[in-house]
Image: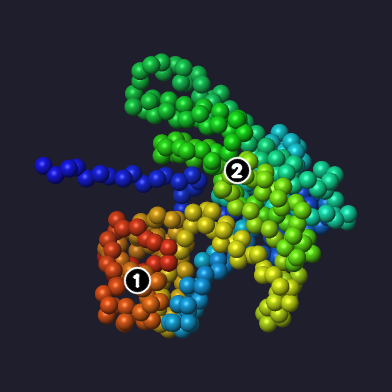
Amino acid sequence: MPPKKQVTEDKVQLGRPGNNLKIGVVGLPNVGKSTFFNAITNSAVPAENYPFCTIDPAEARVGVPDERLDWLHDLYAPTKRVEAFLTITDIAGLVKGASTGAGLGNAFLSNISAVDGIFHVVRAFTDADVVHVEGEVDPARDLEIIHTELRLKDIAMLNKFIEINQRVIDRMGGGGSVEDKKKKDEFNTILKVRDWVASGKDVRKGVWSNREVDAINSQFLLTAKPVTYLANVSEKDYVRKKNKFLPLIKKWIDENNPGDRLIPFSAAFESSVAAIEDPQERAAFIKESGVPTAFPKIIVTGYDQLNLMHFFTVGTGCEVRAWTCRKGAKMPEAARSIHNDIADSLIQVDVMRYEDLKVAGSEAELKATGKLHIRGKDAAIDDGDIVYFRSGMGKAKK
């Protein structure tokens, strides 16, 4: 008798499902968040030198740079080229005590709850003309303030859930229905998560089962969101690639959230670059400075931290386009990025691997070598796949 086929359970991811995810810019007041946002999105958000200048979160989309899309555009010469996008939200500065309502804490924390990931901007420059809400520049202290406020807010939300549900769980006793057992499991998970966060750790750093992740996702916890740390250094330090605060920031991250990404950038430098409208003049300014803009690296890292990737659809004379989906997505989920009708009636998918197409040099050559793959609905789509969805309703997207 043949052995039973092992079924591997797909890992449930922390956070909201779907592809239209957002990343929020978070930090203390006057650390350069809105200046960063203005430059990266070419938007016009006030960036004045006083706390709470940004009251309502501003939102913009930025293109995700990808050399593969550039190559496909050159190959197919389409009439239209569409990048994948990352949605960025500028959130006003948090202060110590925000978790209990200090400053405009409750509103700001709810804005963080509405995004799916965090760009944590920390100040790593001194400037007598730019006041610091805590009096002096101390990146480790600033990081600890934000970390503590997000953690305290999570603890408060979890304690509220526990308080509301404790009596219901107590009345169930030892037995109960399947539904009662499910409620008990969820309650016990929340207790476990509360204790984890109370110990000073972020939810995202825990190892959780799929059942536990489902319970965590229902709470929309702030410390469950992926974080990329952005150290805002002076323009002078950025150009010379030296800054006295960076080792302190790196040490704090290694001790508190090991494995998280740290990207130095200069809001002042990026503002100077963004202010140059002519592409050739902008390129000349960057070349003369001797350092690249940090924005491509920041955008790609944020996109990756949200567990997003993209695949491509191509066509001579029409468009070459990058579509966003979650890593590990099955073909119907990827097709839903384009249109629900395609996903609902999907039959099969023609797939070209980007690397294979680049080696072959053309679709005709790739097909001649047998590198055009046919995939079913249960197959996972991979980053960089070039696909043609075949639909039972006669609707396909290439």
In the image, residue 135 above or below residue 243 = above
Residue farthest along the left direction in this orientation: 1
Could you tell me which quadrant the C terminus lies in? Answer: bottom left
In the image, residue 100 above or below residue 109 = above
- Determine which of the numbered discs, if any, sits on residue 352 in the image: 1
- The residue carrying pointer 2 sits among few (fewer than 14), some (14 to 19) or many (20 or more) residues within 10 Å by Cα, namely some
Q: Quick check: can you spot residue 26?
A: no
Residue 362 position, x and y percent, is 36, 81
In the image, residue 357 above or below residue 342 = below
Residue 233 position, x and y percent, is 75, 58
Q: Nearer the viewer, residue 300 or 320?
A: 300
Please name the residue shown 56% across and 62% down the image. 300
Please name the residue shown 38% across and 25% down the image. 181
Residue 390 position, x and y percent, is 30, 68
Q: Is residue 301 left or right of residue 136?
A: left
Please name the residue shown 71% across and 50% down the image. 247
- Judging from the image, what secondary structure is the residue with disc 2 in? loop
Cα separation, mark 2 vs mark 1, equals 38 Å
Amino acid type of the residue tagged 1 in the rendering: Met
Q: Is residue 320 left or right of residue 295?
A: left
Could you tell me which quadrant the N terminus lies in? Answer: top left
In the image, residue 54 above or below residue 368 = above
Amino acid type of the residue tagged 2 in the rendering: Asn
Residue 349 position, x and y percent, is 30, 66
Please name the residue shown 60% across and 30% down the image. 199
- The residue carrying pointer 1 sits among few (fewer than 14), some (14 to 19) or many (20 or more) residues within 10 Å by Cα, namely many
- Determine which of the numbered discs, if any, sits on residue 136 in the image: none
Q: Quick check: can you spot residue 315?
A: yes
- Judging from the image, what secondary structure is the residue with disc 1 in? strand
Q: Is residue 343 left or right of residue 225?
A: left
The residue identified by callout 2 is 257
